[in-house]
Image (cartoon, grey):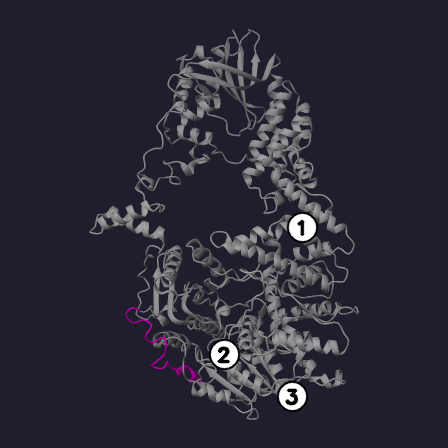
Amino acid sequence: MSVGCDGIVGMETATRSTGPRLALPAPAPAPPALDARQAEVVGWGAGAGNLLVVGAPGTGKTTTALEVFLARARAGAPPAGATVAGAQGPLLLVPTRRGAARVRDAVAARLGRTTGQVLVRTPASFAYSVLRLRAALLHQPAPTLVTGPEQDQILGELLEGHRLGLGAAVRWPASVTAETLALPAFRDELRDLFMRAAELGLAPEDLAERGERHGRPEWGAAAVLLGEYQEVTALGEMTPDRGARLDAARIVDEATAALRAWEREVPDHPRPRWSTVVVDDHQDSTLAAARLLRALADDGSQLVLLGDPDTGVQGFRGGTPALVGLAETHAAIGGFGARRIVLETVHRGDAELRRATAAVTGAVSTAGAVRHRSARVPDAAPGAGAGGPGGPPSGTTVTVLRSRAQEGALIARSLRAERLHHGTPWSEMAVVTRSAGQVAALQRALRAWRVPVAGGSGPGVLREEPAVRPLLVALAAVLAGTTTAEQAVELLTSPVGGLDAVALRTLRRALRARERAREGTRTVDELLVAAVDDPADAADLPAGARRGPARVAAVLAAGRAALERSAATAETVLWALWDAAGLADPWRRRALAGGPGSDRADADLDAVMALFRAAEQYTDRTVGGGPAGFLEHVRAQDLPADTLAAQGQRTETVQVLTPAAAAGEEWQVVVVAGLQEDVWPDLRLRDSLLGAGALTDVESGRSPDGRRAYGPARRQVLDDELRMLAVAVSRAARRLLVTAVLDEDERPSTFLDLLAPDLDPTDARSAPPPLDLRGLVAELRGAVEHRTDRTGAAADLLADLAARGVAGADPTTWSGLAAPSTEVPLRPAEAQVPVSPSGVELATTCGLRWALEQAGGRGERSADQSVGSLIHEIAAEHPHGTAEDLRTALAARWHELGLGESWVGRRQRVLAEAMVDRLAAYVAGVPGEVDVERAFTADVGRAHLTGRMDRVEHLDDGAARVVDLKTSANPLAKDKAAEHAQLGSYQAAVEAGAFGPVRPAGARLVYLGAGAKGATLRPQPALADAADPAWAATLVGEAAEVMAGAGFVARLNDHCRHCPVRRSCPVQDDGERVTR
């Protein structure tokens, strides 16, 4: 039994007893101690007019906003269960969803009672609630939001339609080519232009007029698309069961229009009103939000706006820091005639941290008064003495590292030092960096150093998520009724099948062996499809090969059964696939266990949740939209879905985020990473093609001619970059670490001059050893090796660690010092050694390569090798075949290679046909008796030679000539054929009696891959005719000694460039040992 913050008592399973237990709610947090200015804001009278509160980072703006809201809520609490329409209480707006969720939790903890409505919202969420209420009162379906991926899909379809000549004529300027129109980046710019137009309140005809007036033909062309886009979204409202479809750019203005027209359109119900509207982070409000606030203020709501124009980070979403300064004016948009109160006391960090923040904000171009920049930390600030003797470090540290890897190592060490030496919780540490790409890279680096890192920002493009893709592939196979070979391979090697490349190869071999035993003719691809389509097909395979196909077959069978049920939807079929896959529990355990793999499992579960959320939304919004429609819907999306699906959260982790995500948060320790030139600041103009920024400049009066002035535009971008940096550095409550990299490709940002003016940016350093057992062992080993006064103590510590089983501490395990595990030869002295003719050449050329390949160091078979094997098999089946015979055989068996109709497949087919033509020409000139694939054994000294000869041609005089067919297009040099090791081994076997009393007549290499009129021949004289008739037997003996030995020598040779084991070869840079 538990009691929530709303006082409701519920039952829960007891963990240590059989009966229910009483879990008391956490006590409400005590009200914060407010400074004089904050108290003045909270005490601002309800009838005293609108109020603007400006404060530097850390002055307590969000705390003040919360206290104002709570004071108004308690003073005029609405009746229990009141709806939006009947409420007269306050409303708290926060520009971002993350910020609204954080403030909403604080309100729930402090308010101490239930409410009948959501009191903390984003402007978009508030607008949606207004439109949903209006629709309900008019007995209309609720509106739906067009997601980013859906909007991108609609625009892509419109552009494709125009490419095909459909719709109204669109005249793009010459700078916008057909290739440009097909790029996803072009749709990004188009969406940005549409969003700016919506924020500015411009209809399609307004946008076209601006384009004509200012000579911007791209605006006129975009206006046509904007009109079509609005028509397409409006078409979804034509059926009685569909509500309005709105995108995020239009929804706030739609709500503003609905409120202003309420009495006319909803006459039987009073307009919803709010006595006070508190807006936190007003610097991130959009122009559309400002118009909404104007409508609320005109209806009697008192506005309390809190913000800092120096820390706006939502510019990419239309955030306008200038709205903070406009609030005091009577401007048509953003002007509310508000009184200003400046918060003058910084409650976060110490004086040094405040100086770092002030240095950054002082470089931002002024957007009104700057009095708030002079805010100070009181002398008795809580963090002021944190860095004293014995206390945890505080203040600002700026470090330049030698590489990205060193940067990650230093950050990981610093965070771990805080955890180990000062007890700082992981959750009180964060890393802030400029872009989402840098976030992902730093997350990987920190995880590699075993720092617990919070998961990513959410799933990316759904169809590309590793956890989602196999479910979509399975859904496609279920809908098609059968599985393709490509789908079978993808499912088998996905988490559903669980096979890696080696296991897949084992399965292929098992299927091929079974088919041959049954004397069947199906290809391997056909066998794979049968194995995953029919659960019983793989029943007789070996256990190791059976598991993967059985799992995939069970999943597909469950999906097909779900599809056959009445009223099947994308949700029900996907759930059947997911449930049958059995991945939920192992992924959940792995995600909760921590350690390697936990973050991947966490992200995979989040992605699957997002998939089901998308399926739910599609089913709800699309009348008659079945599983097939949903599959196409997801496949057509090129943008990540902005999902509201629940995601797993682990509290004790380090956050790695962008400044926009960090805004409003606070941590004891903050690392600002990646301050690189051309990265932070990134001064590129973001709208160089369609001019979304120029449109904003025109409407704001900054540009009279519709052209962006390069200097002012770059200054605006620089200010945005500075604002992001200000947010990043001001998140630290005790300690700030700033890092940059100096190497051949990167140099530190000029922003470092603001934070550390005395720093030498060319003084790049390396990170100290990590603060874990690996780092300790490495440091101690270094001390032992360099023979310092610490050597003895380091050796003693290493011995102690080795006795405790710490990896790497025992010198016997150190690379380069340990003795060989064995020096026993592979074969006892005088014992026979199995030798193959191909092995003779390899072992005598490079013993190490032979040994490593024998141990499994071979790469995947290439297409050329597969074709060569097929040509050899055809040659064996048709020893005297004509060109027609060989081409017919090739055509009949070509599908076995699985090369398809790709360019590679067609090219290989042409080459293969040329090979069989050369083979036909060759065999036509050898009409006598021929043995093909002739097996043999012979003892040559210590070597027991075994193998198969491609052709043994019996000549008229009774002699036998050995022929080895080669499909290579690079024949051996003529002078090297005389001592070719493989041919010599064949001849040595014949001389040793492999075929009885047959006289050898030499050997030849027949190259089928080269030759203008026929095959290229490289003959080898009979051994008896050689200067040294015993040379081949001697070479075979040498190979046997190498293969039987205890060590293998690596030798440089002409084949090193293509050696499959060069990365393990000590004579190659790729495989050179780091210890000697």
Camera-side mark, 3 or 1: 1
The residue indicated by pointer 2 is: 62
Q: Give the prevailing secondary structure in the magenta stretch.
A: loop
| Mark number, residue 628 | none
- The correct choice, above or below, for 315 with respect to 1028 in the image is below
Give the mark nearest the N terminus, 3 or 1.
3
- The correct choice, above or below, for 95 with respect to 1010 in the image is below
The residue indicated by pointer 3 is: 299
* Amino acid tagged 1: Leu
- Residue 460 position by quadrant: bottom right
The total number of labels drawn is: 3
- Residue 749 position by quadrant: bottom left
Q: Does the stretch in magenta take in 489?
A: no
* Amino acid tagged 2: Thr
The residue stretch that appears in magenta: 369-390
Per the image, label 1 sits on a secondary structure element best described as helix
Query: Would you call the spot at circle 3 few (<14 residues within 10 Å), some (14-19), or many (20 or more)?
Result: some
Camera-side mark, 2 or 3: 2
778, 536: nearer the viewer: 536
- The correct choice, above or below, for 258 with respect to 863 in the image is below
The residue indicated by pointer 1 is: 577
Q: Quick check: 706 left or right of 571?
A: left
484, 32: nearer the viewer: 32
973, 429: nearer the viewer: 429
Q: CA distance from mark 3 to mark 1?
A: 53 Å
Q: CA distance from mark 1 to mark 2?
A: 46 Å
Q: CA distance from mark 2 to mark 3?
A: 25 Å
Mark yes or no: residue 182 visible: no
